[in-house]
Amino acid sequence: MQKPISLGRRILRKSRLAGTVAAFLASTSYLALADQGTTRITVLATGGTIAGAQAEEGGYGYKSGSFDIKDLISAVPNLDKLAVITGEQVVNIGSQDMNNEVWLTLARRLAEVVASPDTDAVLITHGTDTMEETSYFLSLVTKTDKPIIMVGSMRPATAISADGPSNLFNGVSAAINPGAVGRGVLVVLNDQIHYARNVSKLNTTDVQTFQSGNRGPAGLTNTGAITWFAMPERKQGMSSEFSIDGLTELPRVDIIYGHAGMNADLIEAAIKLGAKGLVIAGVGDGNMTTPALDALSAAAKAGIVVVRSTRLPSGIVYRNNEVDDDALGFVASGELNPAKSRVLLMLALTKTSDPATIQTMFTEY
Ligand code: GLU
């Protein structure tokens, strides 16, 4: 097994860059804004590429979730100067294996941690594949104003130019920054900070994969310096009505991808398998073929909640534009992509199955 960022550390030592970084950190004023070194951060680790190892350092391919969180933290220069960091491993998986059960486990542990007077902020390490969903779910069910920062990486810990260490450093810098308070769950990657609600993964391998298509980022990071943009305007965190208290599972919601020639087969299969809600990753403005519309119209009449989202990476799915949502009893997803629509619909279905009430939720969250 390789050591995380051992290559990077050797380069740092050789170039004496570590000393330069330490001098820079000591000389800049931004860290004085935060309680540098005294903020208590609890890390909840879930695995992902940030904890991934290649068979050979710098080689092609890797296995997610190979390193323990303590190895990752101790490998980042100067992280211990920013905060008092303790870590625990909740799961150690590639985030493609994230599911409702792990979300409930993670959300429960997060709720305990943020309620503790011993924790000022939380850092969650997570794979990037499903971070947009996990972050949105946690932002809707976690009642706190304390900073919750999610961090991942696109390159494994043993890669040449691994991005995990700088993302961890910037994530901790955001977590100790007073400007993070009340912003809900934030995603920090590649010098950008994103709101959980707005962020999507848009590139398979690029380190600049996360974007907040319609709205832009929540802020920027630069070697620990933070610039914040506008506060979130939609409900989340303390103002959210959703809770996991008493929940042992979430209602089944399936996503069905729209395409030319789409038929009703997968819609009917999802209904037969017990879906309580369906999200359509529609073409264009949440559109679909006539056979699909007919099948969904029947589903809505039978009490299944149908949300029209879009397979496009940005834009808004408007209500009653080309599709008559009022007549068909559908919900328009607005800005939420299919993955986030599924999260909100699952939580909405824990409260109601009335499409009009759920439509209001989609305009408020
Ligand atoms: N499959 C990995 C995951 O999501 C790859 C993405 C990453 O972590 O960057 O865990």
Image (cartoon, grey):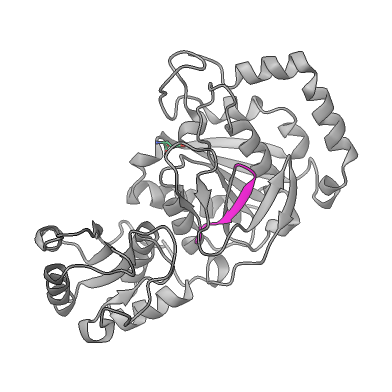
Find residue 80 and report its image quarter: top right
- Quarter of the image where one finds residue 36: top right
Ligand 1 rendered quadrant? top left
Along the line of sight, the residue nearer the viewer: 305 or 295: 295
- What residue sits 64% from the left and 24% below the top? 75
- Compared with 247, 220 (above or below) is above
Instruction: Say if the magenta span includes residue 157.
Output: no
Work out which residue is located at the far front of the displayed protein and give it: 260
Q: Residue at x 60, y 26 (%)?
A: 161
Instruction: Residue at 41% x, 72% y: name it.
Output: 334
Q: Name the residue at 71% across, 58% down.
A: 228
Q: Does residue 191 appear in this view?
A: yes
Q: Seen in the image, is 264 located left or right of residue 29?
A: left
Q: Position of residue 107 (x, y in %)?
A: 46, 53
As drawn, 104 above or below 223: below
Q: In the image, which residues are magenta?
A: 190-198
Residue farthest along the right direction in this orientation: 27
The answer to whether 313 is drawn above or below residue 355 in the figure is: above
Dividing the picture into quarters, in which one does residue 264 lie?
bottom left
